[in-house]
Amino acid sequence: MAFNKKNFALEKKKELQEMTNSAVRRVLDFKKDPNKVIELLNFMARSPQYSFKNQMMVSSQYENSNFTMGSRQFKETMGLKVNENATPIKIVAPVMNTFFKRNDKLVQLRFANKEEKEKIKNKEIKTIQNVWYYKLVDVYDITQTNAKPEDFPEYYPDRRYNFYVKNTEVIDDIISANKKLLKDNNIHLIENHTYNQLGTSVGFAGKNLTGDKIVGYRDGLNKTEILHTLLHETTHAFYHQKENPEKTTELKEFEAEMTAYIVAKRFGVDTSEHTIKYVSDWTESMSKIEDIEQSIKTVSMYSSRIINDIEKQIDPVKIKEFYKQNPEYNVDIKESSIKQMDKIDINKENKDMFQNVSKDEIKKASQIDIVKLAIHEGYNPKKVGKNFYIDKDNHHLTFNSEKNTYYDKENKLGGNPIVFFRNQKNTSFVSTVKYLNELSEDATFNNIEVEQNKLPISEEQLENAKNKSILDVASECGYSFRKSGKYYIGNEHDSLVLNANKNTYNWYSKQEYGNTINFIQNEKGLDFIDAVKYLNNEEFQVANFKEEKVVYDSSKYKYKEKEDMAVSRDYLINKRMLNEDLVNQLIEQDYIKEDKMKNVCFQWKNQDGEIVGSDKRGTGKTPFRGIDKGSDIKHAFNFSTTEKPKDIYIFEAPIDALSYRTLNQDKDGIYMSMNGLKQDAVRYQIAFYMKRYETDPESVHLCVDNDEAGNKFINNFQGLISNQSGKEINIVPEQPKEDGCKDWNDVLVNHVYKEKDRNFNAKKTNVLNKSKSVAMEI
């Protein structure tokens, strides 16, 4: 039979269409295996359980992270090694210490005197393990390790793969061809990236700051993963870069992954173990069958183009040899006429997957009466408060008719009617919204009557229980407290904090929060009804507590000798570019110290030269800042450059004050840091100046940051009248004005680097001039 070019093209198109249809059928038939889901959950349980704050920290640094550990934990528990170039993820970890009680106050064990040590030894005084402080530690996601495909559960998101390859020799050729294809189309390729901001994603496609197209894949992938990722991202780069509001992310991912699958399969690489589940996850939220059908045609077109483009980049002899050795991947001309392609069959079950719901439908579903919905689903909610209902048989299940929400204390679940129904019936979001919309129109449902006050507690008893003092209730349970501002902090457990104004408690280490009823439920192990009865039947004594007034004690803090402060000197002089003489002078006068953690400590002195506080600044990569307990804010870090200062210079931080002084060595006066923006600190400093020098300062320079907060702060001091003279105090706003400089250290560093550039250019010019002079003499 003679070769017919038109028939060949049609047959090739048909073959790609059939491959696409087959893959889509597998996607639509895909159902998650419960055993593999359990395997995934068991695997995830091996990862440390972090607090909500740490989960947010991980998420902000490494998107979609699901499994994190420290490098040592990975090595000891799983035998995995963190990749050499991996950037760590920072989380907060507690540092524990041993304490004992002295006069109702927790004291570190190392500060026990001889008598106390003897009693501790004889167990007359009990010791307590408690959090001493928190520090930042490094953790890594499992995708940043040398984990192999077999180390992951099958359903793990962004897991590693080792795809089946018919002919391993062709892999390098396809990867090289794909790279050349990108280069020919002016698309920049970033290989083996270690960018944490891209999270667990194996690849990306987009545009850089100059608008150029870029494609990349992460570090640590094997050749089959690189091939698959390149094909996926190449599809995005070629066909999804233009703004197209009609094409959703779901459709783009469907097209890119299916195209990658078809192209890879064409060259003997089977990525189905990834593709089928990946596309299934995305298509759960795709809305229209028409979109799916159109995308199937689009995938055939995209894959055909990319296959042709790749084949053009490979040696024709190699292509011919590949198809000769692998005839199943070549196109056979079966007949001259091409029959109409079979359309994919999407059954009714699969159609439900692609239904869409509007915002109005979601709003209507969320507003259906949750108490009636509970009755409709077989529960028996009874009213015990103005808007409060409890299920008669399950006291852990409560409903709030005003907020139209529920809470399941036993399972720690809660939310609106949509969440309630989904949790009860294990239904999809779309089907739940559709069902609740239909139910809201049902006359029988709307005629459901809610019985009132059939439980053994009255509304009056409920309100009485809620109004019991949380301080009295917690004290009756054996806890003692000290007052700190508007809060009461537990002496036995300092993570137990009471808010008397709101009559609530928050036990941070247990992640518990609530009112008096919730406290008794958790503390006594009672259900809601019994907790209310308990609070009504008990007589609670008025709690005793100690007013906490922390006084700064400089003797508690140990500092290095002045000659051993190399780290602080290097940080201030070489990194912050501060004047060396100024730094050394303040060190000699005990205004700057270094603690054992190598933090720079700025000492606060009062008018008599006594140290009454201190704030710290970390010298490492982590921008640590802190203020010692009991530090007197009225005397924050301050120093004078002359015996009789006439002006006061106010800054947000000590380093800003030192930066300004480095830049303006002719401006004498009192330099003072507020450690933020504190109006009282400024007023105190002006008052102390007037008391000491019996006159008004000539001017008060507000040298705060050049931002919105700084501008508002300055406005608060316009028209300030002196108590000494009755005259208006001369307030001088003095913020950084240079481009890109927010604070005074930014300005200083900018000046230093500009000066270095000028000196370098001057030397360069001098060398060139000398070279020209020598050349002329020759």
Image (tube, rainbow, N blue to C red):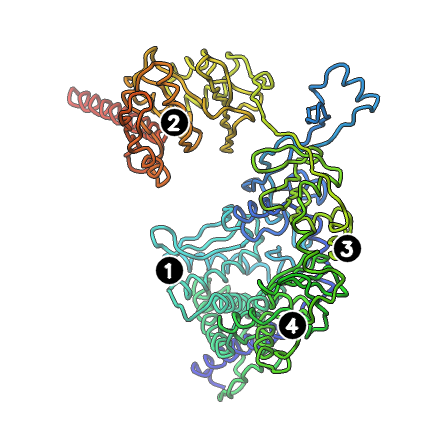
Distance from label 2 to label 4 (Cα)? 60 Å
Q: Residue at x 31, y 30 (%)?
A: 720
Would you place residue 702 above or below residue 396 in this image? above
Distance from label 2 to label 1 (Cα)? 65 Å
The nearer-to-camera label among 1 and 3 is: 3
Would you place residue 411 above or below residue 112 in this image? below
Q: Amino acid at mark 3?
A: Asp
Which numbered dot is residue 185? 1
* Label 2 neighbour load within 10 Å: few <14, some 14-19, many 20+: some
* Label 4 neighbour load within 10 Å: few <14, some 14-19, many 20+: many
Of the residues under marks 3 and 2, which one precedes in the sequence?
3
For label 3, the residue is: 530
Horizontal and vertical percent for residue 439?
Answer: 60, 78
Horizontal and vertical percent for residue 57?
Answer: 55, 45
Distance from label 3 to label 4 (Cα)? 26 Å
Q: Are marks 2 and 1 in contact (CB under 8 Å)?
A: no
Element marked by disc 4: helix
Nearest to the observer: residue 13 or residue 368 = 368
Nearest to the observer: residue 141 or residue 223 = 141
